[in-house]
Image: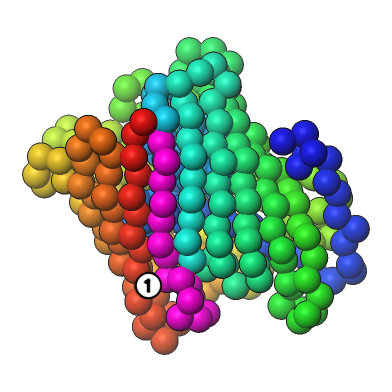
Amino acid sequence: VIALALVLLVAPSIQADPNAFPSSGVDAQSLGRGGTVIACPPGTWSSFGNPATLTPEGYYILAIDHVDRRDTSKPGLGLSIVDTSSFIRGAVTYFKDPEFASFSNDLWGVSFSQTLMPSLYIGESFHMGDYEPDAVPGSEKSLNTFDAGLLYKLGPNVSVGYVAHNLLPSDRDLLEQYSGFGIGLQFPMTIFFAADYEEVPGSTGDKNLRTGLEFQPFERFTGRLGYQDLASGETNVSMGITYTDANGTLDAAIVYDNENENTVRVAFGLSMRM
């Protein structure tokens, strides 16, 4: 982890891309609720949203996800290992051939979370990947960055989160700094609502807005609905379902992109508690 944090980038002089690293959920669970992650329950892919959501739930998880890519028929395969059973909680995330078009190969994330005081958590994430900017095809670079986040639980039913992206000074020629806010609301009858808002510099729009809803229609089953209005111009709707037992979860999601030739993407996930 220390070596990863010390890797610095000598960046070429091209236009910065604030969204080179993903800031939303990339797994089947979070995709089903619109990619919301900043103030959501602990997830296996917190490294790419808000690392502070690795709250002390006291479990160890191995998760595997399959995600259809936007640009090719080749799927992305993700692997995440999470340990929230100790004071310093952590997660290691790996994506092979991710769906993010700017990355040509593997994508890594390492996250940590600590409790500052009751109900207040802080988290840190390091990311590394082989990045090929759209502006300079063939100019692949090893790109690294650092994010930091906060999560505050106002009570058993309300959580608010904040995350700052791309904080390494060496990355700023390629990665502009930006931040996001999120809220999570737990309602009666096991209904959960989440919303994330990000200001995105240097884009055709100026914001990413994601909303999601979780509900439990039957015992052991969780349904999800989501909507995304992104700075890239995409507006996506999604739905998902999860089956849960004592050993883990089975997840599935469908994302419908009505701005990109009506593309439909699917994701499947499996997580195992150990």
The quadrant of the rendering that contains the N terminus is top right
Is residue 33 in view? no
The answer to if 151 sits in the magenta stretch is: no
When the figure is inspected, residue 145 is found, relative to residue 61, above or below; the finding is below
When the figure is inspected, residue 211 is found, relative to residue 75, above or below; the finding is above
Mark 1 closeness class: few <14, some 14–19, many ≥20 residues within 10 Å:
some
Residue at image point 56% right, 67% down: 97
- Indicate the secondary structure of the residue bearing disc 1: strand
Q: Residue 170: where, in percent of width, then height?
A: 86, 50
Residue at image point 49% right, 40% down: 81
- What residue would you read off at disc 1? 265
Q: Quadrant of residue 236?
A: bottom left
Residue at image point 15% right, 41% down: 220
Label count reads: 1
- In the image, farthest residue toward the bottom: 261
Viewer-proximal residue, 164 or 110? 110
149 sits to left or right of 31: right
Viewer-proximal residue, 86 or 24? 86
Residue at image point 45% right, 80% down: 73
The answer to if 73 sits in the magenta stretch is: yes
- In the image, farthest residue toward the top: 117
Q: Residue 155: where, in percent of width, then height?
A: 36, 20
- Which range is magenta? 61-75
When the figure is inspected, residue 34 is found, relative to residue 50, above or below; the finding is below
Q: Residue 267: where, in percent of width, then height?
A: 36, 63
Q: Quadrant of residue 47?
A: top right
178 sits to left or right of 43: right
The quadrant of the rendering that contains the C terminus is top left
Is residue 67 in view? yes
- In the image, farthest residue toward the front: 274
Amino acid residing under circle 1: Arg
